[in-house]
Image (cartoon, rainbow, N blue to C red):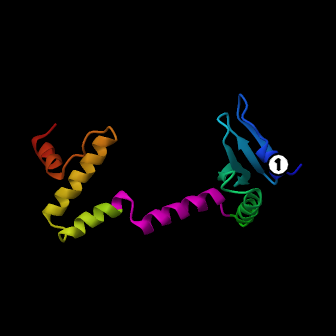
Amino acid sequence: MALTDTAIRNAKARERDYKLGDGGGLYLLVTRSGGRLWRLKYRADGVERKLSIGKYPAVSLSDARKARDAARHKASAGDDPAAAKRRERVKAKLAAGTTFGARLGIHRQGSAGGPLARNAAQTTLDSRLVAAGRRSAPRRSDRASRTARGP
């Protein structure tokens, strides 16, 4: 049975997450905290996959159905909708220049790739690794001296 907007608005949180099916693999996941999330279940290369479409008030029932139809069309053409969504997200990040590699390139371009730029890039890399709870990355000179001295 197809979902209605009234049924979606009346869906309340329960002790466990539950699904309200719409048809064609589209369903609304109602979480324990009361969130309503659109999901699509489909098959790609014989494997069952799930695609997140969005949250309920932001993505209406008709928008979710349009997204389902578009994803089904991609899946029938042999393209994995989830992989296509990931590719779009990566393209957007690269276009915005917000990846660490893009920022590293900016550091290197800052002083024509000289030693100062490499040191700034290494310092940035070290600070990010420390913030992530890892040791700092070995510097090129440290690696060379370790191999020259032996184990």
Q: Residue at x 76, y 56 (%)?
A: 61
Answer whether residue 76 is magenta in the image. no
Mark 1 crowd level (few <14, some 14–19, many ≥20, 10 Å Cα): few
Q: What is the quadrant of the C terminus in the image?
A: top left
**Front residue of 61 and 130:** 61
Q: Is residue 46 visible?
A: no
Q: Which residues are magenta?
A: 79-101
Q: Position of residue 104 (x, y in %)?
A: 29, 61
**Front residue of 48 and 14:** 14
Q: Is residue 47 left or right of residue 149?
A: right
Q: Is residue 90 left or right of residue 51?
A: left
Q: Which residue is mark 1?
A: 6
Q: Is residue 74 visible?
A: yes
Q: Residue at x 17, y 69 (%)?
A: 111
Res 16 → quadrant = top right
Q: Is the magenta region chiefly helix, strand or loop?
A: helix
